[in-house]
């Protein structure tokens, strides 16, 4: 199943190559991937990859920029100006963040490889761009008294984003930890409620209350 939009108008396998590159990079990272493996995944010759994209590094940068572009579009669409500065609006953004990566598991793995092995300049440029997009939303909710005041807005954002990613790629570990005391597995809505409760000054949502009730009944 495709995770990236098709952007090439001619039928010359470029979209298939880009999608195959995403698959191979997400599994093996930049160092482990080869153009031969990408060609095999795409069902084309290595020569065709070199013809369209020159080399592995060009494909890596292209896949990364496509992921970033489509991710930013999805996050922008999730922002509701009417809910600016509220935990409800912020939760909607975080829910969209979690939902996007749920629907794009290979892109999420690619992102993890980027953190582990991308050049510092690439990481810094991407970090600055995304922080400028997300930190202000946390700062606005903080100024409105919706979020705890004892932690910088940037740290609140990093904490929440890091934990969301942990829940996404470590659901086995999370649910095994819960099972030790007989607690039920954590659903996405419940995870979001829990995460928001760590940074918000408002009471827990109905989903969190229901989670507590279910755990008590066990």
Image (cartoon, helix red, strand yellow):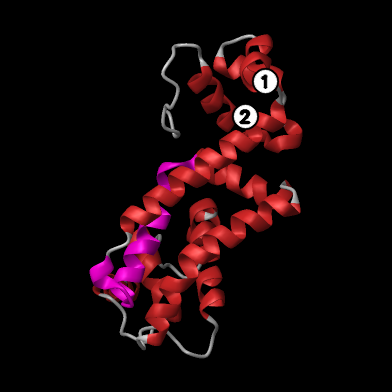
Question: Which element carries disc 1, helix, strand or loop?
Answer: helix
Instruction: Provide residue 205's location: percent of width, then percent of height.
Output: 28, 76
Instruction: Provide residue 143's location: percent of width, then percent of height.
Output: 40, 86
N-terminal of the two: label 1 or label 2?
2
Q: Quadrant of residue 87?
A: bottom left
In this rendering, does residue 184 appear at all? Answer: no
* Type of secondary structure dominating the magenta stretch: helix
Q: Is residue 165 left or right of residue 6?
A: right
* Range of residues picked out in magenta: 81-105
Instruction: Provide residue 33's location: percent of width, then percent of height.
Output: 71, 29
Residue 40 lies in the magenta stretch: no
Residue at x 27% of width, y 64% of height:
80
Q: Is residue 89 above or below residue 70?
A: below
Instruction: Answer whether labels 1 and 2 touch (C-beta < 8 Å).
Output: yes
According to the image, label 1 marks what residue?
37
For the N terminus, give its image quadrant: top left
Label total for image? 2
Question: Which element carries disc 2, helix, strand or loop?
Answer: helix
According to the image, label 2 marks what residue?
24
Q: Quadrant of residue 137?
A: bottom left
Residue at x 47% of width, y 63% of height:
133
Q: Quadrant of residue 62?
A: top right
User: Which numbered marker is on residue 11?
Assistant: none
């Amino acid at each position: 199943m495709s995770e990236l939009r098709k952007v090439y108008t001619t039928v010359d396998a470029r979209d298939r190559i880009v999608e195959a590159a995403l698959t191979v990079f997400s599994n093996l990272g930049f160092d482990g991937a080869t153009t031969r493996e990408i060609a095999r995944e795409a069902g084309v010759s290595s020569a065709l990859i070199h013809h369209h994209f020159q080399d592995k590094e060009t494909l890596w940068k292209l896949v990364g920029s496509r992921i970033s572009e489509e991710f930013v579009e999805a996050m922008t669409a999730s922002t509701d100006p009417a809910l600016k500065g509220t935990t409800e609006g912020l939760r909607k953004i975080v829910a969209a963040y979690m939902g996007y990566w749920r629907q794009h598991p290979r892109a999420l793995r690619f992102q993890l490889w980027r953190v582990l092995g991308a050049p510092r300049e690439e990481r810094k440029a991407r970090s600055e761009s995304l922080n400028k997009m997300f930190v202000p939303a946390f700062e606005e909710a903080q100024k409105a008294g919706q979020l705890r005041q004892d932690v910088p807005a940037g740290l609140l954002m990093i904490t929440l984003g890091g934990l969301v990613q942990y829940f996404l790629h470590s659901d086995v570990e999370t649910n095994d930890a819960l099972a030790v005391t007989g607690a039920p597995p954590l659903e996405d809505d419940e995870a979001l409620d829990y995460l928001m409760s760590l940074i918000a000054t408002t009471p827990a949502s109905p989903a969190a209350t229901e989670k507590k009730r279910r755990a008590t009944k066990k």
